[in-house]
Image (tube, grey):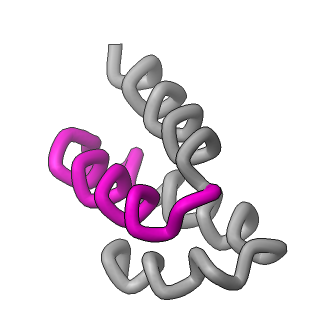
Amino acid sequence: MSRMIYDYTKMILERVSFDPVLFEKELKKALRCLLPYEIEHLRKWLLFYTNEKPELKKCLMHIW
């Protein structure tokens, strides 16, 4: 079940990546419901995903 939540979180973040404010809001929601090891996976994915989207880099402060 948790893997489905993790995948759903990634899908939502990809869909809202056009708006940094909305992206940050969805990231905060995701951090409340993901397990610690899933947050670690999400952190790695976000580092890769935001490489080409510098406007989203400031949102990464929430996962450190």
Is 27 on the left or on the right of 45, as rendered?
A: left
Q: Quadrant location of the C terminus?
A: bottom left
Q: Residue at x 74, y 73 (%)?
A: 53
Residue 55 painted magenta? no
The residue shown at (50%, 69%) is 20
Q: Nearer the viewer, residue 18 or 48?
A: 18
Q: Nearer the viewer, residue 16 or 33?
A: 16
Q: How many numbered marks have been drawn onto this rendered protein structure?
A: 0
Q: Position of residue 32 (x, y in %)?
A: 16, 49
Looking at the image, residue 64 lies above or below residue 8: below
* On screen, residue 40 above or below 35: below
Residue 38 falls inside the magenta stretch: yes
Could you tell me residue 41's position as x and y percent? 52, 53
The main secondary structure of the magenta stretch is: helix
Q: Quadrant of residue 62?
A: bottom left
Residue 49: where, in percent of width, then height? Answer: 72, 62
Region in magenta: 18-39
**Which residue corresponds to the image point at 40% horizontal and 46% vertical from the top-left?**
38
25 up-or-down from 54: above or below: above
Quick check: 23 left or right of 2? right
